[in-house]
Image (cartoon, helix red, strand yellow):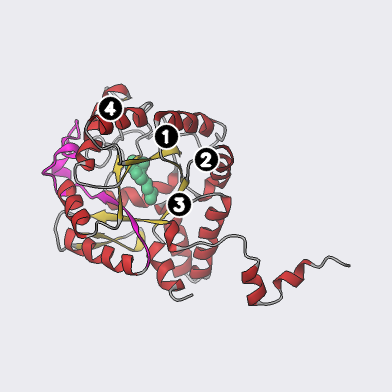
Amino acid sequence: MNIRPRRNRKSEAVRRMVEETKVTTDDFIFPLFLLEGANDKVEVDSMPGIYRLGLEKILKEIEACLKLGINAFDVFPVVPEHYKDKAATKSFDPNFFYQKALKRIKSEFPEAAIMTDVALDPYNSDGHDGLVKNGEILNDETLEVLGKMALAQAETGIDIIGPSDMMDGRVAYIREVLDDNGFKNVSIMSYTAKYASAFYGPFRDALDSAPKKGDKKTYQMNPANQREALIEADLDVEEGADFLMVKPALAYLDVIKLLKDNYAQPIAAYNVSGEYAMLKAAGMKGWLDYDRAMMETLLSIKRAGADVILTYHAKEFALLTKGK
Ligand code: PBG
């Protein structure tokens, strides 16, 4: 035997030398859930270790994370029911607590990259990502609201807009609204291949944003389809997306790889709430070694081709690897 692969595994020093994939905190965007009450802090039942935080608490959290090397954050609002309506009007009201909080976050931490989510579901009384009329999720009418929402968010000074709604034509529409209003430097991280997935359950608990009726299958992609992601990616690139995102991550590693192989834009992967919850639950039961499973999970997403990982594990990873 003149080829013995085990020679390159013989010690920690050698293993580290030949390691092909490294995950670092530079790769992460840490999702945060914002509550209206400035000092409130409520754990998400289905996501142990993840909290909904008021503005003052979020500022502290961002400060702590920046010290740990996490530089990017995706802030989602928890919208109390009485603010929701058919037209999702709070989503583009500059005086709404979310938009005001974003402004404060950016003014306190100009060096952080702040991302926002563009979709109607947290604000609309139907709990869908678009406007609903007679049970139909309207596409073109929704674009107008998405544009107003993106503009209201851009006006707060945030860095990256994340359209997660899956309406057709939204990237081009939002790009045009942003450019026409002087926000040509605000980036778009498009949820390019967003699947109609069961793994968003805990997120909808956190935001209380589940659809009141029906499901999201007429706009989010069918989990059975891979090639269709190429159609979505072609459109997003043509329409001006700066990043292409695949969501969820783990059940869709093949889609991450497919986009990585076919596009030069940075590829993002959303390691979603249900993926976090699965590991947490098994870890808490003692059924697997949580820290190791988390590392392996993040490595697999990066190895598949993700340049950017949105993950609820960001802070735990940073604490675990500090000084390593
Ligand atoms: C809103 C949105 C969702 C997620 C991110 N943005 C939920 C959904 O589409 O139902 C899910 C994130 C997660 O599960 O962690 N459109």
**Residue beneath disc 3:** 308
Between disc 3 and disc 1, the foreground one is: 3
Query: If you read the primary sequence from the N terminus, does the residue marked by circle 4 or circle 3 appear first?
Result: 4
Q: Secondary structure at mark 4?
A: helix
- Residue name at image x 30 percent, y 22 percent: 140
Name the image quarter holding the N terminus: bottom right
Taking the image in four quarters, ligand 1 sits in the one at top left
**Label 1 CB, ligand 1: below 8 Å?**
yes
Task: Name the one closer to the observer, 51 or 107.
Answer: 107
Query: If you read the primary sequence from the N terminus, does the residue marked by circle 2 or circle 3 appear first?
Result: 2
Residue 125 seen: no
Residue type for callout 3: Val
Between disc 4 and disc 3, the foreground one is: 3
Identify the image quadrant of residue 137.
top left
Query: If you read the primary sequence from the N terminus, does the residue marked by circle 3 or circle 1 appear first?
Result: 1
Disc 1, disc 2: CB below 8 Å?
no
Residue type for callout 4: Thr
Span shown in magenta: 69-97
**Residue beneath disc 4:** 142
Residue 220, numbered circle: 1
Task: Name the one closer to the observer, 41 or 100.
Answer: 100
For the residues marked 3 and 1, what is the alpha-carbon distance in whole angstroms?
A: 21 Å
Image coords of residue 308 (percent x, y): 45, 51
Between disc 1 and disc 4, the foreground one is: 4
Q: From the viewer's perspective, tell me whether residue 157 is left or right of residue 210.
A: left
Query: If you read the primary sequence from the N terminus, does the residue marked by circle 1 or circle 4 appear first?
Result: 4
Image coords of residue 164 (percent x, y): 36, 39
Task: Name the one closer to the observer, 303 or 198.
Answer: 303
For the residues marked 4 and 3, what is the alpha-carbon distance in whole angstroms?
A: 28 Å
Query: If you read the primary sequence from the N terminus, does the residue marked by circle 2 or circle 4 appear first?
Result: 4
Residue type for callout 2: Ala
**Residue beneath disc 2:** 264
